[in-house]
């Protein structure tokens, strides 16, 4: 099984709903977003174009972040049985090398204690959910790196429920950002399954990995319009 | 407890101890502390989002009683939305917002103003109801019309049928909705043309979609269906042309952007109509068989009629003027003599009016090259497949796979009705109404009265002057007029002085041009505001009642149809964050009881909701859930309520017969039927009535010359010149407005932390969007502060430079710059563009003129660097 995401920027309308869904699902830490929208404009009036590209962790097959982390003997970054690259907050030493080496600018060094979502306010019931009701990836800490987990808590649940084959098909076992897109521009699933939507999208729309020259072999594919920054 | 402004804000935020002491006003509820285990099971509740007017199906996920996340309801995919927007995704923060109003508040400082501290006093619900009911009783005994009920989004929270039933029972005609801040001119143009309002392009079959200002990729009615439908169609080859001054996300996903000068779209439509007529690219059969284009127009501009009042056409068989009955073959074109007077067909009146509207003439006005206009006309003609039919299922129907679409782009203008009439007439030329791939019309000819001239009532019964001589076709209320009438009732002949206003989920002054004038009217009445948040309107109130949020209340939700689907849905409560005991439904019910009018209220509820098999009973109370159960049963013909609780909705897919044959085919086709109003004969007759009414009553404040322009039977180039364009030529820039995805008119998104802090650094405020070359010419760089000054005011904001806007235009988005001191600073960033927009409402519909203002722009720190 090779889990991949396909993002069709030709379909993407730039709404940032996937960004919002990620933030809510993963207990957003201000200044350390896991999913961002890059809007870029080109051309000269009146011949203009605008592109929308959402960026999250590429969960590379050869993750440079893991290499860097292992290099400083922190061993906080792992690539697990489903190919998901995860950061163990307890092991992270906050050196920032993972952020420095990632070709995609993904890891975010969370500099401060997790702040209240409402500036200066008390915790909302959502924020006050105790650790017992949070996945370990959502127990945020200060001065450690964090990033997109492919919503590991959802994939892990598929394993627990014995429904790995339903990943990308059943909403409960699919990353949050891939569930909310109003224009069906995001797909998640098993590239090794020739009948999967991701396999079809990559084949029919020529979706490709970004910055392949770095050799990281990302597990996120893009259908590009052209002109993206 | 007396609550100062400072206390209000502090209490909303950080004072946990104060929160505990205060009980309901400031405290968050406690989260269950005994919740344990690795994975607490999720509870999933199906419901409907109502943060905007799309009403998307949602799944709300709860963990340990707390709303954890919100996703689109997969069950709704086949009927409406595939996904949800960032507002919907982060909607739980609309409920968990600490800045909400949580208990009834009474103003103790009699001075009203955004610069005044209301000195709120917390009061009990009992005191609030008693105070309000006592005042209402007195008004009802005196003159019930002195009560004004205003709602905006409230219409969609509990539905306008409850407030209308309440006001009917009470005896006031003054129920005022917000449509003149939305799209009422588009609705009225529809109604004047085909007898009802609402349309959608038949996107599944359309090959060319020409969009004149509709932002379905950001914020618009039907956007969450249009977005995926258009994207799919584009993938199969449908072309899109976006005609708009600003390069919106719609333009970004279009095949062509035509940056038209603001307000001048109509001349492009007229020029293309001219092209279609001159080149013979028109559907003559459609115009003759379905529309009034062949009807004969006399020298006074009115359609000739026989003794029975039937309109006359020129019969090419008998060579006489006669009613269009079986056997008659009407002439589409020609000049004739009838009763010794010259007449010509309505079609010819329009065609001849276009004589000067060459592409070059249109180019001069619209600021779009003539060859672009010419090419667009040719593309439309080619795409229309004139003379062809196609089969969809068992239905063979006209095939016209080209459609023109708009919302505020053509509507939010002083001549909004005429602007969209031009779009409709162009499409009638092509014969695309209800054609496969064309413009799908909703509830065609549902109200035949729309084809009759207005009564031009005077003196007005309603404080908003709707359907009076001032706004003869103000068929969707004229919300911004209420304030103006309150300030000077005698000037409009209103035979009473209003004493009390109840505002339900509306931030009326802020959502209207010339905001300052709107606020001044608040001194004239006792004001009750039912609101989730401390909006500007709430800040000006005498009593504020908290309301339940959309995730906390029951309702038979409004839904959106599509050309091939319709559905019935509910909203159900998942939480009650602040233990608020009443929503507006409960407030109305309680007031009806205290006013001893509950049974009359029930009568009107049954009438308004058309509860026949499942009526509300007199002599008893209903909880919100009981009410929704009755409404659901009636609307779904008795479907068990368990279905609503489980699925949130029940949907129906429509076959091609329903999509294509029940509209214009059934209502207008052939002899002996009413006809689509290609020519505005009823507008000519309304204008005549305006003249009579003004003369009869000696009305001084109506400019008849302007009504002549507004009520022209066909759109003309003068409709491209609203008041500021005529009078403020010295101001170099056109100022346009638009919406972004991250905010909407409900004053709650501005506090949502996800929308402010998680989506990017550009969502917490809005910008003065300016062409990069213009900025360079002015010496203005990205992020500089500039002043935007109009004839009524000025504001200061941060510049955003782009290639995606006309050099003669600046754009400022809505829903920023909140002025209520009840919001924290981070939620008040940006500019409130309505503060500086001139108000010149459409005289036909009352539509607010949001996109007509002109301005100058200069660096905030400098002097004299004006462009």
Image (cartoon, helix red, strand yellow):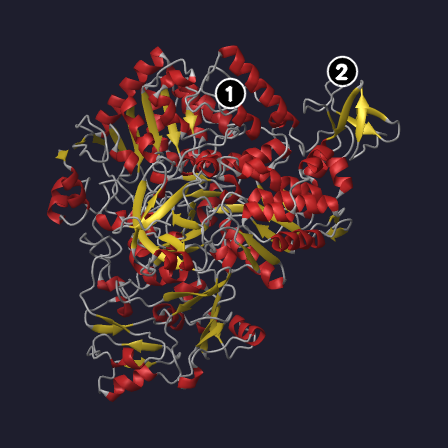
Q: Nearer the viewer, residue B40 or B28?
A: B28
The residue lying at 37 percent from left, 25 percent from top is B484
Query: Dot 1 corresponds to which residue?
Result: B469
Which of discs 1 and 2 lies nearer the camera? The answer is 1
For the question of whether residue B564 can be seen, the reply is: no
Q: Nearer the viewer, residue B719 or B632?
A: B719
The residue lying at 55 percent from left, 35 percent from top is B417
Mark 2 surroundings: few (<14), some (14-19) or many (≥20) residues within 10 A? few
Residue B150 position, x and y percent, is: 38, 29
On screen, residue B28 versus residue B644, left or right, reads: left
Disc nearer the start of the sequence (1/2): 2
Residue B95 position, x and y percent, is: 30, 47
Q: Secondary structure at mark 1?
A: loop
Quarter location, residue B855:
top left
On screen, residue B763 versus residue B117, left or right, reads: right
Q: Which quarter of the figure is the N terminus of chain B placed in?
A: top left
Asked if badges 1 and 2 are on one and the same chain, I answer yes
For the question of whether residue A122 can be seen, the reply is: yes
Q: Furthest-front residue in view?
A: B864
Residue B730 position, x and y percent, is: 42, 41
Mark 1 chain: B
Mark 1 surroundings: few (<14), some (14-19) or many (≥20) residues within 10 A? many
Disc 1/disc 2 C-alpha distance (Å): 28 Å
On screen, residue B503 versus residue A95, left or right, reads: right
In the rendered image of this protein, does residue B3 appear above or below residue B99? above
Quarter location, residue B552:
top left
In the rendered image of this protein, does residue B233 appear above or below residue A212? above
Mark 2 chain: B
The residue lying at 39 percent from left, 63 percent from top is A176
Q: Nearer the viewer, residue B856 or B402?
A: B856
Q: Furthest-right residue in view?
A: B318
Where residue B307 is drawn, which disc sits there?
2
């Amino acid at each position: 099984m090779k889990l991949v995401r396909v993002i069709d920027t030709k379909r993407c309308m730039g709404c940032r709903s996937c960004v919002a869904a990620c933030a809510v699902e993963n207990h957003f830490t201000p200044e350390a977003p896991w999913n961002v929208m890059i809007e870029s404009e080109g051309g000269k009036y009146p011949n203009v174009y605008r592109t929308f590209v959402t960026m999250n962790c590429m969960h590379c097959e050869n993750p440079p972040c893991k290499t860097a982390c292992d290099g400083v003997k922190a061993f906080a970054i792992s690539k697990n049985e489903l190919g998901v690259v995860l950061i163990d907050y307890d092991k992270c030493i906050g050196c920032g090398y993972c952020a420095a080496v990632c070709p995609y600018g993904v890891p975010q060094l969370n500099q401060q204690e997790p702040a209240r979502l409402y500036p200066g306010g008390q915790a909302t019931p959502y924020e006050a959910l105790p650790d017992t009701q949070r996945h370990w990836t959502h127990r945020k800490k200060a001065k450690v790196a964090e990033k997109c987990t492919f919503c590991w808590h959802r994939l892990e649940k598929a394993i627990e429920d014995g429904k790995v084959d339903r990943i990308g098909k059943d909403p409960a076992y699919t990353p949050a950002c891939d569930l909310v897109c109003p224009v069906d521009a995001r797909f998640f699933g098993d590239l090794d399954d020739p009948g999967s939507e991701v396999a079809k999208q990559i084949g029919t729309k020529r979706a490709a990995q970004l910055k392949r020259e770095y050799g990281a072999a990302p597990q996120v594919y893009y259908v590009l319009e052209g002109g993206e920054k | 407890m007396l609550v100062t402004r400072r206390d209000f804000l502090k209490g909303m935020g950080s004072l946990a101890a104060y929160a505990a002491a205060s009980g309901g006003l400031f405290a968050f509820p406690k989260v269950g502390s005994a919740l344990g285990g690795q994975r607490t099971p999720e509870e999933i509740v199906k419901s409907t989002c109502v943060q905007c007017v799309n009403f998307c199906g949602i799944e709300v996920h709860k963990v340990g009683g707390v709303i954890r996340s919100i996703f689109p309801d997969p069950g709704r995919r086949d009927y409406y939305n595939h996904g949800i927007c960032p507002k919907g995704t982060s909607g739980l923060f609309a409920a968990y917002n600490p800045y909400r109003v949580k208990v009834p508040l009474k103003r103790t400082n009699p001075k009203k103003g955004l610069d005044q501290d209301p000195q709120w006093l917390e009061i009990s619900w009992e005191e609030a109801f008693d105070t309000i009911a006592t005042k209402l009783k007195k008004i009802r005994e005196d003159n019930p019309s002195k009560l004004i009920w205003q709602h905006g989004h409230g219409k969609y929270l509990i539905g306008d049928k409850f407030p209308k039933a309440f006001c009917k029972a009470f005896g006031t005609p003054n129920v005022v909705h917000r449509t003149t801040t939305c799209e009422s001119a588009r609705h009225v143009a529809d109604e004047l043309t085909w007898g009802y309002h609402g349309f959608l392009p038949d996107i599944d079959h359309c090959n060319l979609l020409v969009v004149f200002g509709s932002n379905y990729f950001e914020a618009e009615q039907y956007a969450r269906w249009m977005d995926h439908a258009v994207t799919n169609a584009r993938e199969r080859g449908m072309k899109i042309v976006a005609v708009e001054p600003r390069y919106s996300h719609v333009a970004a996903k279009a095949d062509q952007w035509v940056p038209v000068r603001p307000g001048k779209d109509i001349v492009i439509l007229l020029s293309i109509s001219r092209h279609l007529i001159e080149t013979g690219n028109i559907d003559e059969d459609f115009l003759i068989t379905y529309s009034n284009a062949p009807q004969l127009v006399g020298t006074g501009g009115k359609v000739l009629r026989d003794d029975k009042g039937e309109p006359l056409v020129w019969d090419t068989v008998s060579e006489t003027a006669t009613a269009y009955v079986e056997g008659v073959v009407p002439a589409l074109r020609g000049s004739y003599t009838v009763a010794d007077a010259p007449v010509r067909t309505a079609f010819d009146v329009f065609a001849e009016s276009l004589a000067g509207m060459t592409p070059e003439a249109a180019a001069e006005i619209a600021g779009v090259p003539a060859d672009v206009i010419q090419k667009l006309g040719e593309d439309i003609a080619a795409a229309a497949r004139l003379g062809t039919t196609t089969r969809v299922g068992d239905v063979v129907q006209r095939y016209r796979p080209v459609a023109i679409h708009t919302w505020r782009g053509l509507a939010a203008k002083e001549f909004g009705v005429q602007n969209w009439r031009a779009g409709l007439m162009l499409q009638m030329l092509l014969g695309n109404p209800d054609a496969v791939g064309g413009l799908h019309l909703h509830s065609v000819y549902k109200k035949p009265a729309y084809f009759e001239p207005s009564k031009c009532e005077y003196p007005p019964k309603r404080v908003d002057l709707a359907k009076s001589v001032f706004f003869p076709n103000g068929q969707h209320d004229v919300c911004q007029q209420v304030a103006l009438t309150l300030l000077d009732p005698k000037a409009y002949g209103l035979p009473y002085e209003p004493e009390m206003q109840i505002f339900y989920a509306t931030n009326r002054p802020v959502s209207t041009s010339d905001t300052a004038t709107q606020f001044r009217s608040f001194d004239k009445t006792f004001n009750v505001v039912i609101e989730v948040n401390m909006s500007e309107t709430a800040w000006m109130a005498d009593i504020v009642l908290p309301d339940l949020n959309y995730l906390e209340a029951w309702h038979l939700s409004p839904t959106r149809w599509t050309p091939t689907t319709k559905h019935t849905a509910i909203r159900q409560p998942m939480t009650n964050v602040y233990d608020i005991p009443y929503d507006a439904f409960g407030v109305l019910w309680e007031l009806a009881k205290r006013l001893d009018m509950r049974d009359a209220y029930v009568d009107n509820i049954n009438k308004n909701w058309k509860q026949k098999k499942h009526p509300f009973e007199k002599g008893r109370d209903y909880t919100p859930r009981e009410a929704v159960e009755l409404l659901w049963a009636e609307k779904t013909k008795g479907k068990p309520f368990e279905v609503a609780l489980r699925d949130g909705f029940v949907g129906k897919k429509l076959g091609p017969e329903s999509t294509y044959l029940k509209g214009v085919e059934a209502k207008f086709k052939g002899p002996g039927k009413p006809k689509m109003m290609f020519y505005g004969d009823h507008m000519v007759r309304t204008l005549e009535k305006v003249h009579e009414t003004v003369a009869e009553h000696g009305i001084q404040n109506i400019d008849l010359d302007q009504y002549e322009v507004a009520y022209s039977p066909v759109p003309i180039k003068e409709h491209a010149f609203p008041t500021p364009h005529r009078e403020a030529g010295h101001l170099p820039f056109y100022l346009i407005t638009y919406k972004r995805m991250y905010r909407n008119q409900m004053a709650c998104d501005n506090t949502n932390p996800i929308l402010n802090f998680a989506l990017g650094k550009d969502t917490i405020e809005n910008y003065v969007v300016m062409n990069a070359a213009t900025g360079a010419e002015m010496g203005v760089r990205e992020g500089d502060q500039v002043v935007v000054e109009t004839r009524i005011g000025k504001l200061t904001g941060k510049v955003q430079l782009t290639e995606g806007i006309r050099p003669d235009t600046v754009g400022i988005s809505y829903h920023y710059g909140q002025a209520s001191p009840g919001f924290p600073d981070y939620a008040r960033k940006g500019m409130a563009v309505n503060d500086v927009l001139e108000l010149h409402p459409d005289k036909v519909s009352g539509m607010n003129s949001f996109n007509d203002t002109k301005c100058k722009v200069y660096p905030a720190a400098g002097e004299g660097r004006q462009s």
